[in-house]
Image (tube, helix red, strand yellow):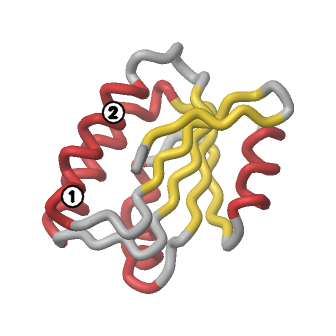
Amino acid sequence: MKRITILEVESKKIVFFDLSFCPAEEFKDLIEKFFEFVRKHEKKSVRLLIDLTGLNYIPTDVMYINDRMKQVNEFLKCQAYIGMDGLKKVLWHIFKKNVTVETKIFDKNECAINWLISC
């Protein structure tokens, strides 16, 4: 399964990072691949969609991803999350202070994509 793909919608590109049902032992490696991928883009150019549905993670990974997100904020134009529920939503409220780009949480993929192409 390819976890990082480019979606082209209405001639706009969206980076789709699919973490859905990602096993905890693969999480850190995928995060590193994602950050390498994003850093190849121009600053403030990446429209990002992340699917967290059913994500399995180790609690220490939360701090790790928070630190890494600080390093890619400058490359993001806007970002949207789907599949954020329960504890993931609680953690989001803790870490959103480190987000410097417009960010929204959606229940449906289509809604998130429509918002991303408008930003």
Number of the front mark, 1 or 2: 2
Horizontal and vertical percent position of residue 71: 32, 32
Quarter of the view holding residue 108: bottom right
Query: Earlier along the polypeptide chain: callout 1 or callout 2?
Result: 2
Count the marks: 2
Left-right relation of 49 to 11 = left
At 51% across and 60% down in the image, what residue appears? 51
Q: What separation in Å lies between label 1 and label 2 (alpha carbons)?
A: 15 Å
Q: Secondary structure at mark 2?
A: helix
Question: Would you place residue 12 above or below residue 25 in this image?
Answer: above
At 25% across and 62% down in the image, what residue appears? 62
Horizontal and vertical percent position of residue 65: 27, 51
Q: Which mark is residue 105?
A: none
At 47% across and 26% down in the image, what residue appears? 74
Question: Which amino acid lies under the numbered mark 1 shown in the image of this protein?
Answer: Met
Question: Which amino acid lies under the numbered mark 2 shown in the image of this protein?
Answer: Phe
Count residues near mark 1 (Cα–Cα under 10 Å), then give few for <14, some for 14-19, many for 20+: few
The residue beneath circle 2 is 35
Taking depth in this image into account, of 94 and 24 the one nearest to the observer is 24
Left-right relation of 117 to 7 = right
Taking depth in this image into account, of 12 and 45 the one nearest to the observer is 12
Is disc 1 in contact with disc 2, using a CB cutoff of under 8 Å?
no
Count residues near mark 2 (Cα–Cα under 10 Å), then give few for <14, some for 14-19, many for 20+: some
Q: Secondary structure at mark 1?
A: helix
Horizontal and vertical percent position of residue 63: 21, 58
Horizontal and vertical percent position of residue 15: 56, 37
Q: Quadrant of the C terminus?
A: top right
The residue beneath circle 1 is 63
At 35% across and 43% down in the image, what residue appears? 69
